[in-house]
Amino acid sequence: MMIVRRSALSRRALIRGLGSVAITLPFLDAMVPHSLIGSAEAAARTAKAMPKNRFSLLYYPNGLESSAWYPKGPDGDDYDLTGLSMEPLKRHQKDFLLLGNLSVPMALYDAAGDHAKAIGCYGTGVRIRKTASDDIQCAISFDQVMANNIGNRTRFPSLELGLDYGRMEGGCDPGYACIYSNNVSWKDAKTPAIKEVNPRVVFDRLFGNAQASDHAGESRDQQETYNRSILDYTRDSLMQVNAQLGQADRHRVDEYLSSIREIEHRLDAPPTKEELPKGVVRPLRVPDTFKEHFRLMADLQILAFQMDATRISTFMLGVEQSRRTYNEIGIPEEHHGLTHHAGDREKIAKVIRIDTYMAEQFAYYLDKMKSVKEGDKTMLDNAMVLLGNGNGYATRHDHDNCLSVLAGRGCGQLDPGRYIVYPEGTVMSNLWLSLMDRMETKMERHGDSTGRLPGLGTSNI
């Protein structure tokens, strides 16, 4: 493929290869026009070329052991994370807002179904219908409101990822359909935005890459051709692009393509050799541990942002009532069961260890976003990343003081580095309105919102 260089390289420039294989370039200095410096046209074209704000929600199921998560001191910019489950995030403390007392009051209407209500009411701000059949009733979630408004600017309006599929039929929480507990993103009242759990499928969606498994019956040579790295197909095109770039941009492209190659290697890694029970088949290239699976999916999500394939994504770190165990950190019991600890100190200690383990992975996520340079900033500067949930204190499922860590600077629209404690009962949907504002999506109301959330940054819109 020949890319014609005019005054600036296009933000949509591609490195093309065989068939439908194509790699979108990351943001480069060469995409900013220099020939018209000082002119209004140059300013407009520069603004168009610059990375746009992205939003990502990472949903953590089952609630927190809140007593070990939140700082004990006052709010402000001088709070201490030492000794807390949050401590792995200490190195990023200046890069996020810790938001206290955000609640999901719509989940409080019924004594049963706290897990289904926690996630079903979380991003929608409505009460979900109590039913264990397919007669479900939810509402559009805030991320899909944003996708409907700006999603036509990218290849994927939104990208939904997860670490567990969960059941999609029958009842899971007493009286509530499983579909509620397993989906945080909703296109409308009846239709969840289904998440993808298999990293190979996500990779192939991003790159249009054909795999041997998709071409049964073809010759060995044909199958080997399909199984080559997508980078092998793009060498000639890459050489043409590199000829147009300065040294810093060539280095940036090299880092970007190296990250793609590294993800491919992880996808191709052989499964562990532990013996499986009779009749059980290991899913193809889905990592065994939470850490490995999380990091691979997180890298793919960040890569999608870097490619500008999407600007809106949700990532479920598990389904509600998750039966996940954490043998890799010495916890063979199911997470959900442990959260119902009834004051048992040993169980509480294990829940805290799981929360800390999750915080370690989120710290990795922020490390990764900060490592991606975009002009004189980083991807994290040009994003809003929320780690959250709708259950609140795990053992009570009170839906109050729900986990809310908002990282990034949102293209200058957030002012991180502070702990903000809002009045008790502040509605989570007020945060959704505030984030939608910063994603060019103006709404008068969403769900049970009562107004915008103050104090998030320089643009309290």
Image (cartoon, rainbow, N blue to C red):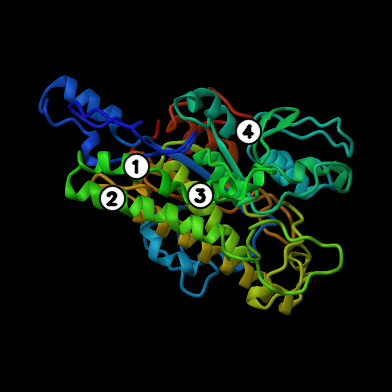
Instruction: Identify the image quadrant of residue 461.
Output: top left
- Secondary structure, mark 1, is loop
Give the residue type that dot 2 points to: Arg
How busy is the neighbourhood of tag 3: few (under 14 within 10 Å), some, or many (20 plus)? many
From the viewer's side, name the closer residue of 4 and 187: 4
Q: Which residue sits at x=31%, y=52%?
A: 254
- Secondary structure, mark 4, is loop
Q: CA distance from mark 3 to mark 2?
A: 18 Å
Q: CA distance from mark 4 to mark 2?
A: 36 Å
Give the residue type that dot 3 points to: Leu
- Residue that numbered label 3 is attached to: 300
Callout 1 touching callout 4 (CB < 8 Å): no
In the displayed structure, 33 sits above or below 255; it is above
How busy is the neighbourhood of tag 4: few (under 14 within 10 Å), some, or many (20 plus)? many
- Residue that numbered label 2 is attached to: 252
**283 sits to left or right of 315:** right
Discs 3/4, front: 3
Say which label, 4 or 2, has the lower sequence index: 4
Q: Which residue sits at x=26%, y=39%?
A: 240
Give the residue type that dot 4 points to: Ser
- Secondary structure, mark 3, is helix
Q: Could you tell me how many numbered marks the image carries?
A: 4
- Secondary structure, mark 2, is helix
**369 sits to left or right of 283:** left
Callout 1 touching callout 3 (CB < 8 Å): no
- Residue that numbered label 4 is attached to: 141
Q: State whether residue 315 appears in this view.
A: no
- Residue that numbered label 1 is attached to: 26
Quadrant containing the N terminus is top left
